[in-house]
Amino acid sequence: MSGSPRPADLFASPAPVLSVAPVLLPAPGRAVDLEIRVSAPVTGNDLPVLLLSHGQGYSHHLSSLNGYAPLADFWAAHGFVVIQPTHLSSRTLTLDPADDPEAPLYWRSRAQDMTRVLDRLDEVEAAVPQLAGRLDRGRVAVAGHSMGGHTASLLLGTRLTDPHDGTEVDLAEPRITAGVLLAAPGRGGDALSEFAAENIPAFLTTDFSTMTTPALVVAGDKDTSGHLTVNGPDWHADPYTLAPGPKTLLTLFDAEHGLGGISGYDVAETTDENPARVSAVQRLTWAYLRTRLYPGDPAWQTVSAALTAGPDAVGRVDAK
């Protein structure tokens, strides 16, 4: 470790961030056009792209391009261009669920939103002139929390059977080379609660065996998610346990579904509010993606050793 930067050194000088929203991408065939938020450091070039998929919290605006500021702001301040769509499942939209068999969670459309963004990065740059020529389109990652974690897993290679027509669904996006799944749903079948089996049939056939893209799976050891699973906190580790390597599992001690409060600043629905835990998630997820997108970069080794070892460890790391 001699000569390696300390964790404090890695995060000592966050860059000022520009954030532009809404950026509108016309989307024929979609119920409404796609709105995104773009956040980036004001300086720097060859910036990697990080797609961030929101979950389905109780609050109105967290499930939109306006959510997850603790993560988006941090990642952008440390060198990523973070792009956040408002998925059709957002509470900010008033769509008629009778108009789409995928309602209310729009699991397929969510993943397609991300592919649409990557297809149209030229339009994103044109809409945010400060980004012109600054993107590294060869380094793309995805992250998502809760239902957003499900979206991210589909883009990383997870498959399922469409409950409406019985076809296998493959939404893997080859341009994405790393991912972070935060409190993501686990396997289907008998692991689901009665509520989930009846109301989210797409979860029944989740198959992680095809999720081959490298990913960090983040799970809270107190995240029981009883409305979705009968397996308790272990369910959220399924994307690690059941997927092929290379995968890394970060189990956060005493963390519930909000992982300390990552979905927004001062969110009342966060049952385990803990600013120190949010800080750890910010740093560990950034470090993982940094090392995955830039092989040989010591960020993950340095930060994980500092935060997941010793008496003050925030969690445990497993890898395969």
Image: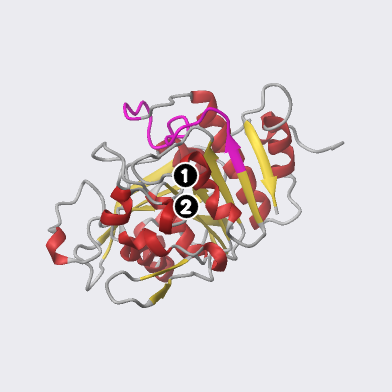
Tell me if label 1 and label 2 are in contact, CB under 8 Å.
yes
Residue 131 x %, y %: 46, 56
Element class at badge 2: loop
Residue at x 26%, y 54% (from the top left corner): 199
User: Front-most of 215 and 3?
Assistant: 215
Residue at (74%, 42%) from the top-left corner? 301
Quarter in which the C terminus is drawn? bottom right
Quadrant of residue 59 in the image?
Answer: top left
Mark 1–mark 2 Cα distance, whole angstroms, equals 9 Å
Residue 145 percent coordinates (x, y): 43, 46
Residue position for label 1: 231
Q: Identify the amino acid type marked 1.
A: Asn
On-image quarter of the N terminus: top right
**Residue 178 against residue 57 in the figure, above or below:** below
Q: Which residue is painted at 43% across and 70% down in the image?
A: 171
Q: Position of residue 153 (x, y in %)?
A: 48, 59
Mark 2 neighbour class, 10 Å CA radius: few under 14, some 14 to 19, many 20 or more: many
Q: Residue furthest right?
A: 2
The label on residue 68 is none
Compared with 298, 260 (above or below) is: above
Q: Which residue is mark 2?
A: 186
Q: For this view, does 213 lie left or right of residue 130?
A: right
| 71 left or right, relative to 319 | left
Q: Which residues are magenta?
A: 250-269
Q: In the displayed orientation, state which residue is furthest to the front.
A: 190
Residue closer to the observer: 216 or 251? 251
Labels 1 and 2: the sequence-earlier one: 2
Q: Is residue 38 visible?
A: yes
Rendering coords of residue 235 (x, y %): 49, 47
Give the prevailing secondary structure in the magenta stretch: loop
